[in-house]
Image (spheres, coloured by chain):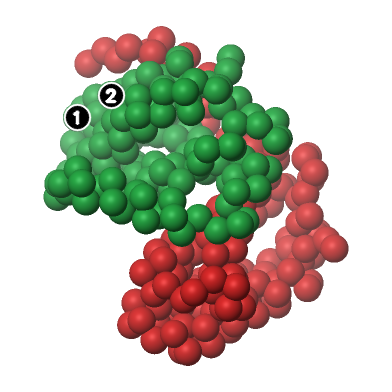
Chain colours: A red, B green
Amino acid sequence: MKFPRTLVFTTLALAAGSVLAHEMKPDFVIGYRQGVYKMIRWNFAPMVEMVKGEHPFDAAQFTRRATRLSFLSHQLDEAYPPGSGEGAPTDALPAIWEDHADFMAKLKDFQREARALRVVAETGDEARTKEQFVKTAGTCKACHDTYRAE
Amino acid sequence: MKFPRTLVFTTLALAAGSVLAHEMKPDFVIGYRQGVYKMIRWNFAPMVEMVKGEHPFDAAQFTRRATRLSFLSHQLDEAYPPGSGEGAPTDALPAIWEDHADFMAKLKDFQREARALRVVAETGDEARTKEQFVKTAGTCKACHDTYRAE
């Protein structure tokens, strides 16, 4: 079968080389990684405002944001390949690769708590949802304290 | 599942109504939007390589990437609020807000085809998956031609 290569590859001129080559281009990896965090922050912000009482608690919106957060947390699994600590501006510290097992364990903590946040948000229980949100945010901080530049 | 148009628009209006202060800061919105596209490109790249034959077709990987693509396509629904056409460097053209209905229709095309890509990828049918990938990429190009700066 022939494909209209021009159509695809004009649109996606960026995408060339092997899968591994892509993932090893530091600016591509770093851009991806920062994109995940931008999406996380976007969804985090309305939850923060609800937890702080700056906006009325809305269980449906909270669930939607927590569901996205949980999805996004897993997209970080492939965001820190070896060699992606430099090559473009990044706040990721070398410690991420120096103690990668600990870093990945902390990422797993975040993934577990973000999932728990989705589950509790779905129940509509405001108090327990807010409590779990604080616990989830704690897993962010635990990682940032050690592995992210100020 | 098909939703009645009124329900869709009510849902969108509610979502717009729940847009919080954060989301109206243009640099925050633009950063979010670009983050979505960075994640899209990251997942698109390995699919391009498989379609081009630069990398062996791997139905499981293709399905994983297509699933993410489908998820991400829906995250664009809230990425273009009024007023987010300036305030930070962006390739988004003013036409997006001048003919928003057409823009949103093109976004829906992308969402529909990305979902179809996930569905066909899950069957493991290489030829049909590649065909649907080209169709999906066509919806990207259709929007970029009119609404994205060169």
Q: Give percent across and percent down for residue B125.
A: 18, 36
Q: Give the secondary structure at mark 2.
A: helix
Q: Give percent across and percent down for residue A91.
A: 78, 55
Q: Give percent across and percent down for residue A18.
A: 52, 31
Q: Tell me which chain the residue with mark 2 is part of.
A: B
Q: In which quadrant of the rendered image does the C terminus of chain B lie?
A: top right
Mark 2 vs mark 1, foreground winner is: 2
Q: CA distance from mark 2 to mark 1?
A: 11 Å
Q: Earlier in the sequence, mark 2 or mark 1?
A: 1
- Residue that appears at 59% across and 82% down: A134
Q: Give percent across and percent down for residue A59.
A: 39, 74
Residue A9 can be seen, yes or no? no
- Residue that appears at 74% across and 69% down: A144
Q: Give the secondary structure at mark 1.
A: helix
- Residue that appears at 31% across and 23% down: B134
Q: Tell me which chain the residue with mark 1 is part of.
A: B
The type of residue carrying mark 2 is Lys
- Residue that appears at 70% across and 35% down: B87
Answer with the quarter of the image where residue B69 lies. Answer: top left
Residue B6 left/right relative to B46: left
- Residue annotated with mark 1: B128
Which of B127 and A145 lies nearest the eye of the viewer? A145
* Picture disc at residue B135: 2
Q: Are marks 2 and 1 on the same chain?
A: yes
